[in-house]
Amino acid sequence: MYKHLIYSLSLAGLLAACNQGQKEPGTGDSSKDTTQSAAFRQYEDHFIEALWKISPDWATSVGYHKYDSVLVIPDSASQQQELAFLQQQQDSLQTYDTSKLSSALLIDYYLIRNQLAQRKWDLTTAKTQEWDPSNYNVSNTFATILNETYAPLDTRLRSFYSRLNNVPAYYAAAKQQIKDPVPELTSLAQDQNLGGLSIFEKDLADSLQKSGLAADEKKQLLARAKTAATAMKDFAAWLKALKVEHPRSFRLGKDLYEDKFKFNIQSMYSAEQIYDSAMVRKAWVHGEMARISRQLWPKYFGSAPVPTDSLVLIKRMIDTLSVQHAKPAEFQQSIEKQLPTLTAFIKEKDLLYMDPSKPLKVRKEPGYMAGVAGASISAPGPYDKGGNTYYNVGSLEGWPAPKAESFLREYNQYILQILNIHEAIPGHYTQLVHANKSPSLIKSLLSNGAMIEGWAVYTEQMMLENGYGNNAPEMWLMWYKWNLRTVCNTILDYSVHVKDMSKEDAIQLLTRQAFQQQAEAEGKWKRVSVTSVQLTSYYTGFKEIIDLRHAYQEKLGSKFNLKEFNEKFLSYGNAPVKYIRQLMLD
């Protein structure tokens, strides 16, 4: 699951480079008004700078560090200030004649327009600030300031110190905003805030030992950090003790769901259409899995009778193959060992350019990120082309043996390879390295999750299509199982948030029809109860990319080249697939 990007070049320098001769695919349309395009590029510059002033946390998370010392207090006054900013920017957008913008700039226009409308909808219609306490957590930004090396340690520590000043007021305002919160999100907020305490209670002290700050500065910093940690603990305790007479359900309902899907996914389809497509895909995948299972049956079961129920047949075969997995203590090590093999395969098959100067670092998932997904990528972007890319891996430390065994059977030796393709090579990690080369800062900052997740799913199929795993039926069977997860993510999310699917029915869908282990199914239920719509991004993006590749191949005929398609697709940055499709097929 893709996490926030971490960026750090100077904005002015990067924008100057973007506007001085660098071209993005689609910018060479001579029929467009160059005066209008130049004016819009200047607007983009002003928009981004204004955005960072109103959203300093976001600025820090993407590597723009001018406002590191600022922590916005989430009270009514700051909300009104943000709404005024959104309206001002919407008014500014209306002054541009979109028919006179180049195609690439038109995508930027659409992305900005969507971002403004989405944020206004969130504040005024969805009102998540009232019922989602997990919105309130200062840990992530403080961790970025402390751990990234974009500036000397002493400089970063002084920003850290200034930012600490507003932490007590931040949590006091959060308490005032919260009304009838969702219980599941209340628990998540407690866990994540408590998980972030180590930043202030341990990590800061370790950094101070390496710093050149004077003794008085260190003392003041530690004292202020202690006050901040107390505020975080108090907030978590307040949430735990909160008595809510009419708590909001975590289920969005059809209207809010369709709106959120429209803003977050930016698909050419509606949420309901994607749900219907996923149901069709599930039936087709079941058919393929049954075919492969019958093919493999004699190899593993000899002359034993083949089950007549195809779902029982598939499950028997998957359970047999799933016992081959890593040991609990070697889970992260197994991931690290596999990455070079994936890189070598891509180079051998000439599927995509791999930049050797952008190393991937595997690490234990930080505590403040825990509770949503077991593996994720935190990658640098255009502000910090030399920054670290992290593969965050959830730890099995302290898990009961049955739970760990269930998890490892889910991520068996076959699935673990597919997971690494998806999260790392040539999935998220590789895509984000390519995205950094796009001269459009807007496409990097306002990135489309469905394109990013869809690419990761697409690469799984692409790797197997080109012979990864030696075309072994076992690997294909396990990939279909993994792809079924993508499909059932969409079915689950829509069914839970729109159709009121129960937990029991959700677990049945995931364990019987998607062949997931109980631990994985329980974890997915937790995820769908604390997130919405994001789970649909995998299948939606995958479907749109596969459809685009078919259309592009049909257009070029014998001139089609897979590497050229992959690299051209990635050259547009993190834009929604529907816009990339227009540019590639125009």
Image (cartoon, helix red, strand yellow):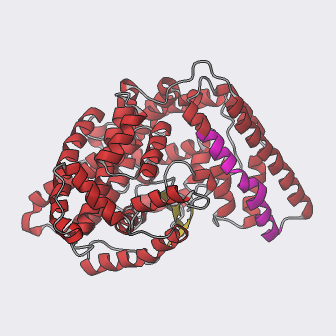
Residue at (59% x, 42% y) in the render = 55
- Looking at the image, the residue that sits furthest to the front is 304
Considering only vertical position in the picture, is 579 above or below 584? above
Q: Which of 85 and 572 is in front in this view?
A: 572
Residue 61 lies left or right of residue 288; in this view the side is right
Q: Position of residue 489 (x, y in %)?
A: 35, 45
Start and end of the magenta stretch? 188-212
Residue at (32% x, 66% y) in the render = 321
Q: Where is residue 348 in the image (x, y as percent from the top left)?
A: 27, 81
The overriding secondary structure of the stretch rendered in magenta is helix
Residue at (73% x, 66% y) in the render = 153
Q: For residue 198: magenta?
A: yes
Q: For residue 71: magenta?
A: no
- Whether residue 262 can be seen here: no
Q: Which of 494 and 103 is in front in this view?
A: 494
Considering only vertical position in the picture, is 28 above or below 112? below
- Whether residue 305 can be seen here: yes
Residue 6 lies left or right of residue 178; in this view the side is left
- Looking at the image, the residue that sits furthest to the right is 216
Residue at (50% x, 26% y) in the render = 249
Q: Position of residue 520 (x, y in %)?
A: 43, 51
Considering only vertical position in the picture, is 394 above or below 465? above
- Looking at the image, the residue that sits furthest to the top is 245
Q: Position of residue 88 (x, y in %)?
A: 50, 31
